[in-house]
Image (cartoon, rainbow, N blue to C red):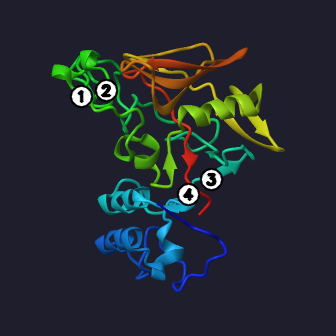
Amino acid sequence: MIALFAMCMSTKAQAAVYGDVDGDGHVTINDVTVLYNYILNDDMNYFSTSDVDGDGYVTSGDVTVVYNILLGIGPAVDTHEYVDLGLPSGTLWATMNIGANTPEESGDHFAWGETTPKEVYNWTTYQWCNGRWSKMTKYCSNSAHGDNGFTDGKTELDPEDDAATVNWSSQWRTPTKEQMDELRTKCTWTWTTSNGVNGYRVSRNGKSIFLPAAEGYSGSILSSGNLGYYWTRTLGETTRYANYLYFYSTSVTAEAFERSSGCTVRAVRVSQK
């Protein structure tokens, strides 16, 4: 793992196209090759363009981002807005839900690990099992819950299964449980109404985002009662559940919900690039 330091000078100009490591104006397989050469040989010719995901290091994660662009998993650039709440982790939060056009809209609902909305949210329709929660085919650490004893040990969503990455771009992802807990504990939550929609104004350092009470799906039934259901990208302690944020007018909690259920997604951004 090669750290990037701001004091270092690059012999290449910063690429104008996100993911264009070699600076030729396009994202191609050669950008992947250049990244591998950089990681293996410390090729400083591409210093300024190699940290594609903006995390301060050049790792296999940068290779994954370029591969995702080549595979069409999210556009290379996007115009979705975000807010820097000054959180200790530096996490940048989107101003609206995936599938929404305004901060007040609920947006789309997704089963955990799925990237498109649907009409029925249950185990029969869930992508990552064979009809039952005890027959998981991905994201399973317990052989008793895996199809024919299947396990893969995965506890966080892969980019291709992340509704934020697939629907917006490789710069976005569903927040981890830790990022959601940080938002929940480090910010001020105020129940309010915005443009006729109930939800929470989440504030810190003079900035804020609005989380609408977007409800959640079980089967084909949408809950009611001004409730908020927001997925994290982190699996729960048992394979059947994934962590999510749940709220209503007098409570904001972190819980685990059946993966087959339909919840909304408020994305976080990888970097400010």
- Residue 251 appearing in the image: yes
Residue 55 bears which disc, if any? 4
Say which amino acid is labelled 1.
Thr
Front residue (pair 66, 189): 66
Residue at mark 1 to residue at mark 2: CA–CA distance: 7 Å
The answer to whether residue 12 is above or below residue 122 is below
Residue at mark 4 to residue at mark 1: CA–CA distance: 31 Å
- Residue 58 in picture, x, y percent from top left: 47, 63
Residue located beneath label 1 in the image:
137
Task: Determine crowd level at label 4: few under 14, some 14-19, many 20+ residues with C-alpha closer than 10 A.
Answer: some
Residue located beneath label 3 in the image:
81
Report the residue that reaches farthest toward the bottom.
Answer: 11
Task: Determine crowd level at label 2: few under 14, some 14-19, many 20+ residues with C-alpha closer than 10 A.
Answer: many
Tell me the element at label 4. loop
Mark closer to the observer (3, 2): 2
Mark closer to the observer (1, 2): 2
Say which amino acid is labelled 4.
Asp
- Tell me: 262 left or right of 3: left
| Residue 259 found in image quarter | top left
Residue at mark 3 to residue at mark 4: CA–CA distance: 19 Å
